[in-house]
Image (cartoon, helix red, strand yellow):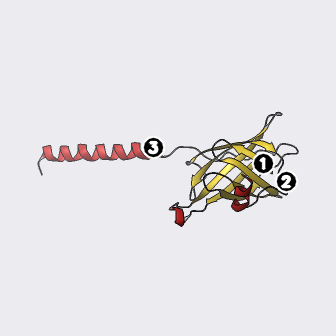
Amino acid sequence: MSQQMMKTVTVRWTAIVACLVLLVAACSSGESVPDPQPMPQGMSFSGMWYSPQFEHLYLRQDGDRVEGVYGHRRGGTLEGRVEGNLLLFSWDEPGDRTAAVRGASGQGYFQLRFDGQEPELVGQWGYEEARVGGGQWTAELIREVRDSDPSTIEEFFRVH
């Protein structure tokens, strides 16, 4: 192989490696789950919340466990564990083969924040095992959750 050919191959491989490094850097968001902080006094994740991304969200907290249902598209469920003011959860949106809608699932987190005015949830969701990367998920508290509020997707769509 001539020196000119070797130089051309080296330049091309260098360019390919540089592109791959840039691609990996662009794909990794650098975002991570925040560290838990103390839960604000008298607060919990229980309640009827409104999310601009996923509509109504009903959460029920029992000890350090939380279960919920929300109305995005055909509805979804979430369940998770509380650490301080942080809820680490898994979510599931079942599909519907008769309507050709594929299901989806993943992980996420909410951090409960209270500035003395209105409690809010600030978090993210991700697909499969990722807790971030899918998008932002925020919500504001509408009211306390009631026993008559929905706890399943079917109940949710009877109410909404």
Confirm or deny contact between disc 1 and disc 2 (CB under 8 A): yes
* In the image, farthest residue toward the left: 2
Q: Is residue 9 left or right of residue 104?
A: left
Indicate the quadrant where residue 130 lies.
bottom right
Q: Amino acid at mark 1?
A: Met
Q: Position of residue 147 (x, y in %)?
A: 85, 57
Q: Which residue is mark 1?
A: 48
- Please tell me whether mark 3 or mark 2 is closer to you in this view: 2
- Which of the two residues, 43 or 17, is positioned nearer the viewer here? 43
Q: Amino acid at mark 3?
A: Ala
Q: Which residue is mark 3?
A: 25
Q: Position of residue 22 (x, y in %)?
A: 40, 42
Q: Position of residue 129 (x, y in %)?
A: 58, 58
Task: Categorize mark 3 by other alpha carbons within 10 Å: few (<14), some (14-19), many (20+).
Answer: few
* Residue under the point 21% across and 47% down: 9
Mark 1 to mark 2 CA distance (whole Å) = 8 Å
Q: Which residue is mark 2?
A: 146
* Residue under the point 75% across and 46% down: 49
* Residue under the point 73% across and 57% down: 158
Tell how many labels. 3
